[in-house]
Image (cartoon, rainbow, N blue to C red):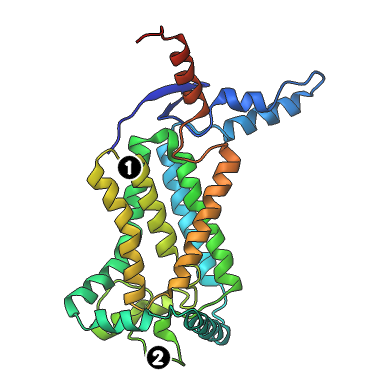
Amino acid sequence: MGETTVTAAEGRTAADPSPVKEGDAEQRVPDVGGDTERQRTARSVLRRLRTPGRPRIWWELALIAVSYWLYSLVRNAVPEQKSAAMRNADWIWQAEHSIGLAFEHSVNRAIDSVTWLIVGMNYYYATLHFIITIVVLVWIYRRHPGRYAATRTVLFVTTGIALVGFYFFPLAPPRLMESGPDFIDTVVAHQTWGSMASGDLKDMTNQYAAMPSMHIGWSLWCGLTIFALAKLPWVRILGLLYPVATLIVIIATANHFWLDAVGGVLCLAVGFGVVRLWYGSLPYGPSRAGATSRSSEAVSRPSGD
């Protein structure tokens, strides 16, 4: 889905235009006379950290494994404040009613009546959240390694922000609400497997970590990454459809309110903002070095071409 272009950056190979090039970083930190060796070393280390290069496979595998383990540990260590989670769910439901957009119950009931469709959505919810995200990470690593560090960092920051939401705003999903409409827990109703949100595996995860929705945060990250970096038009379209389909699934299965999805989008926006501040550019944008090179080429080209 993409082609690889390898360049050199201080002895490290990188592919695709990186969000930040070494020359730009050096211009931001001019060499000041009288600096100590420690200061120069610190600036050198900072420049290297802010210059994405070709990732090391074993380091990345270890980083992803440890990060997901920490995410699961922290997420499930958050106290399951049932009473607060129920109050927050009632508040969300009333807030949606107040603006005339409390449609989750209707969607849940309508799609549950089509057995093959809701069973498929149950498996979608339980599996694709992880599978697609891993596939996209591997694809970026192989096809766009120069963009990998920045793009991966967006995902990590997004997930970290979500943990803050889980702790400070415990929220029951619609299927667990004790008051209000009778949502259907579709996993229990159709006895499907694989989801830790319901059924036999429900005790393995925090049931009240619904806000923000990381199904939306991660799927939108995947969709934007595919749309920005894929070459084939139909693949780019599928990338955009993936978060849309995920939104329908999380509502149909009564695992989230649509406002949870808004929370996921906001977390992703923070992730992109942090990467923009750190690297000086968004993961998918052209590098300043690349733009300068193209401008120089245009100036040196003879007129009348």
At mark 1, the secondary structure is helix
The dot on residue 290 is none
Residue 50 vertical placement versus 160 (above, below): above
Q: Position of residue 72 (x, y in %)?
A: 48, 64
Residue furthest top as drawn: 302
Q: Earlier in the sequence, mark 1 or mark 2?
A: 1
Badge 2 amino acid: Pro
The dot on residue 139 is 1
Residue 138 vertical placement versus 130 (above, below): above
Q: Residues within 10 Å of mark 1 (few under 14, many from 20)?
A: some
Q: Residue at x 75, y 28 (%)?
A: 38
Q: Residue at x 45, y 20 (%)?
A: 294
Residue furthest left as drawn: 116
Q: Which residue is mark 2?
A: 181
Residue 61 vertical placement versus 180 (above, below): above
Residue furthest front as drawn: 304
Q: Say whether residue 10 is left or right of residue 254.
A: right
Q: Residue at x 44, y 91 (%)?
A: 180
Residue 140 vertical placement versus 99 (above, below): above
Q: Position of residue 205 (x, y in %)?
A: 44, 73
Q: Position of residue 44 (x, y in %)?
A: 65, 27
> Which callout, 1 or 2, points to the residue nearer the camera?
2
Residue furthest bottom as drawn: 179
